[in-house]
Structure formats: C-alpha cells, structure tokens
Image (cartoon, coloured by chain):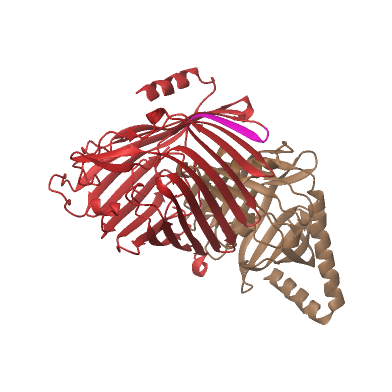
Chain colours: A red, B brown
Amino acid sequence: MRRALIAAALLAAGPASAWEITGAIEAELRGFTQSPAFAFQDDTRLQPSLSFSARLTQDWNGGADRLVIAPFLRWGNNGDGRDHVDLREAYWLHQGDGWSVTVGVDKVFWGVTESRHLVDIINQDDAIEDIDGEDKLGQPMANLSLYGAFGALEFYVLPRFRPRPFADFGARLGGPLPVGDPVYSDPDGENNIDYALRWSNSIGSVDLGLSYFNGTAREPVLVPAGAGLVPRYDQISQVGLDLQYTAGAWLWKLEAISREGHGPRFQAAVAGFEWTLSDLGGSGADLGLIAEWNYDGRDQTLAPATIYDEDLFLGARIALNDIGDTSLLAGVLIDSQTDARVLSVEAQRRFGDNWLLGVEGRFLSGGVAPDPITAINRDDFVALTLRRSF
Amino acid sequence: MKHALVAAAAVALSIAAPAAAQDAAARGLEIAREAERRDTGWRDEQVSMTMLLQDRKGTTRERTLRMMILEVPGETGGDKSIAVFDSPPDLTGTILLTHARVGADDDQWLYLPALKRVKRISSSNKTGAFFASEFAYEDIAAPEIGKFSYLYVGQKSCGSLTCYVVERKPAYRNSGYSKQVTYFDTQAYRPQRIEYFDRRGAPMKVLTLTGYRKFGGRFWRAQTLTMSNRKTGRTTVLKYGNRSLGTGLSDATFSQQNLRNIR
C-alpha cells in the first residue's frame, strides 16, 4: 500500500512530458495433474488467475535522466497465497559519461547458466509466481556503475530486505507444514543494509563477472518450530564468478560461488554448455542442446536445503524463427543420488501482433528428504497462458 | 539468367586467362574500396525503421526498431551496432548488440528486458533469419571489405544509372551463399542492387536499395530496402524514418554492460 502511494506520488511529481507505457494482461489456467499429497490440501485441479504488468518510462534531460515504474499484480482468488502485488521496478536513473546512478526499486540479473541462477543474488525470488527462479521481487537499492575499457564496476547498497513469499498452507506447492513469519539472525532484521559489488568485462570470446555480496541471505533456512516451519534469514558473505566462453556454435558456461555464514563455508558450481544447430535443413529453425552439471557442497541441515546438490541438467531449446517466434524449451534436472527429477517444458507463440499463447509444465518426481522436492512432488502442473501485450 | 551467363563468362575467362582474372579481382576490390572510402567518416548513425514482413499470400506483419551504429574505421575494424525493438509489444525493449569482426565471427549479445538479462549469443549462425525476416544475419552484418573476395564483372545499366557489377564471395565460414552480385552506381558508388546465390549457385534473393538521400553533407543512405526471396515468395521491406549521422555516440554506449540502460 505504501509503495502504491509512493508510485502515485512519483507519477504526480514526474516531469511533464508523456510517459511511455508498455505492459501486458495475462490470463492463466493452471491445472494440477494429480491429487494432492496431503489430505488437508486443496484438491481444486483447475486454478485460473489473471496477471497484469506495466512499465511506465519517462526520459528527460535528453535521456540523461529516467524514471521507470513497473507494477505487477496477480489475482486468482484460489486461496493459494498466490495473489499479490509487487513493484518490480520504481527507480530514477541518471546516466553520465562512463557512469550511471540508479536509486529506487530495481531488478538486477547476474549469470550465464540455464539450470540454476547461482550467482544471481540481488533480488528475492518471487517463488509464488513460479518455481523456476526467474521471477523476482523488486529490490530497493542505490547503485553506482562505472563503465570503461576495464569493463563495468557496479556498487550496490541494498537498504531493505524482502523475505521470500511462500504458497499458503493447504495450497498446492505449499508443502506439508505451515510456514510462519520470517526471523532474522541479525538484530536489524529486514532493515539490515546489504552490500554488493561486481566487476564484469568482455575480453574477446570470454565474458567474465566477479561479484561479492555481504548481507542477508536471499534463501531462508526452514527451521522446524512447533507444528510448522519458520524461515530464518542468516547473514552471509559470498564471492561469485560467472564465465562464458563463446566458440562458434558452442557456449561454454560456468558459475561458481563460495559462501560463508550458512554453516561451514561451502562452494557450489554449475558448469556446462549450450550447443546450437542453426538453420536446420535450411528451415530457419534453431535447435539448442544444453547440458549442465550442478554441484553444491553445503551442509543441507545448517544451510538452506537445495535440490541442486549433485544434479545433471539436460535441455533442448527449439526456435522456429517464424513470424510468431514460436519457441520451445524443455529440460530435466536429475539428482544423481536420489534420482529426483524436475521436468520443465515451456512453449510459446505469438498470434497477430499482440497476442501470445503459452504453455508451461512442471513435473516433479522422486526424491528423499531433505531434498525439498519431496514436499511438492505430487504438485505437477500444466499452465496455459494467453497474454495481450500493449 | 543473363547475370549467370555474365558470371559464367567471367569464370571461363578466369580459367583461360589468369592475368585477366587478376585484373578483375583487383578492379573488383578497387570498386569495393572506393565505395567504402566514400562512406567513411560518418562516425555514428541513429535511425528508426519499420520492417514489413510479407508472405506469398500478401499477409503483412510490421515490426519497428531503432538502430545505433558506431563506425570503426579501417579494413580490420568492424562497426558496432545496436538494434532496439519497439514492436511487436512483447519484443519491446529487446536489444541486439553486434561488434563486427573481420576474419572471425562477430561478437553478439542479446538483452532480454523481462529478466533484465544480457546473453552472449553464438553468431556462427549466418544463414538464419533476422527476426523472421528475409534478411539473414549475414545480410544485415556490416559488409566489411575483408569479409569478401571480389571480381569485377563489367558495367550495366541499373534504372536511370549505370552500375559497376562486382561479384563478391564470402570469405567467412558458414555463409549461405556461393556468391553475391553487387551493383554500385558509377556516379556515387552507392549499392543499388544485390543478387544472392545459394550454396548450389542458384539465384535465391534480390535486394534493391531505393530512395537514396544524402546525410551529413556527403553520405548517401537508401531509405527503402526491399529483399525478395525467389524461393519462398516472401518479401521484407525496410523503410527507414528519422536518420541522423555524427550524433556523438561514444564507444561506451556499445558495451554489453550498458545494454540495460538503453531505451
């Protein structure tokens, strides 16, 4: 509510020229393919919802200054805790010669791999939007970036932490136990100030990034408390490396982190390749094959549990490059120890200029505790989306 | 057909008389260099454009984009370019950044606004369609001199003008073409027409460049590019709108880290 007021105030106070407005309204129908694992969970198989996203942009000073406001809303009234409003972006950007400053709420993405976004840490996961780690909550920040022959240096001060949203107890994807209010190992709680910095550069065929983060972990440790779980957010410091080597049709990728603060210091990495067969048989279609190995050395009881401990990811991406930009991405993450599997399929096609039809499926199977998949492995779903962009 | 005959004659000549072929190669390169020389010194360019995609049945789709180009002078330097999509709306804000290279694949990055993610992409795909158009990636890449070998074919009338006809063969890997026949008018060395021949040597596409206007006092730019594909019957028309040269764009604008700040 307060954010909405700030947005309204920004709108009213912004420079007088016209705002550029883009966005989309999307209808989604999620269908769960199985009955729930627990008797207390809602067995409504079809769950429709609507989402709305917009992006308002205003430049002045010849483009040196910019205001961006990007609200997001999902509403379905399915009693699953998925209804939410968020300000994805609401910032002022000033660009100088070789530098820029951003103040406000923004999204920042770091990394190169497809199966896991290991290095990416600025924004909290919007885990109720989807479980693929690609939807993010807006993060309040002040950022200074310097650009030059050395590449880019980015400094971030992140004054307010945003806890991860969870599906409601009793809803699909909500797991067997109720999740309570967050607790923090730092007395400042969500007001602890986090810091991050990153250097990145492109040197010939190599794209390289080195990052450092110090502050509240974005991943919570789910601590048993009473009849439920309490998400506890610890203080961590993390060094990250992301690297891509581009050689013809081959993209070689590596992300690695070393983290302190979640039990003993541990390392984690994801490495692999994407190989593209382009213009298949002169049809214009591209086929990309992806293979990535995930390793995570964390103590699964002291640190937040992860499904990426020793997992192989195999994926395929098809782009028809037709007038509707038809594309399909399918991938499976296989745990080498427990044989737990997450199969994910996404496809979309544009109709006319403004309509986008999409289908998305997530299928989970197997797993042995503490693999988090065990809590939701009967929650396979297929989602159909129809999006009207403007 | 006539062009094919001319080309065949040129090939026959090259077998019969190596000296003449050497002359033809030197003359071809000379014309390409003269065209390049006349088009040197514009520093940078900003232009908006509409891309009309038309299929055999006449159904059309429209896309709008803006381009920023930075001139990197010299035969070994590759130009840098940024293409920002404005429509269709689900592509709004998608950006393709290209650093052209001579003797190697170009460096390319794609910016995906929904995730705010910059992806370095493979540019070994030369033959694929640029955003579903009849322009292949290699057609829109900067035609740096060193990317081709040249052969002068002769002079021909082209519209109301006379053109030098120069055959050029891609010197880079993975091209979809055996050759391209280019027509430069004798008046100002402007490309007027390019005929593309597939790997088997059969005619494939024809590009015509029309509506030439002078910018920045001495630089000619075609305001309409029409690419017709003989095989598929599809046509892509690029109509250029506002264009300005020498706007003072800096090299830093064309870095992958800057993509998130581009609008």
Q: Dividing the image into 4 quarters, which one contains the N terminus of chain A?
A: top left
Q: Which quarter of the rendered picture does the C terminus of chain A lie within?
A: top left
Residue A338 location (% of width, % of height): 30, 62
Q: Is residue A337 left or right of residue B61?
A: left
Position of A242 compared to A147: left or right? Answer: left
The image position of residue B57, as x and y in percent, is 46, 56
A248 sits left or right of B43 in the view? left
x 42%, y 21%: residue: A6
Residue A128 image offset from top left, x and y in percent:
31, 41
Q: Does residue B179 show up magenta in the picture?
A: no
Residue B8: quadrant of the picture: bottom right
Would you say residue B93 is visible in this rendering? no
Picture coordinates of residue A263, whole percent (x, y): 39, 46
> What residue occupies the far left of the structure in this picture?
A39
Residue A357 vs B245, above or below: the answer is: below
Provide the major secondary structure of the magenta segment.
strand
Q: Residue at x 83, y 69 (%)?
A: B24
| Region in magenta | A97-105
Give whichever of A370, B162 is nearer the camera: A370
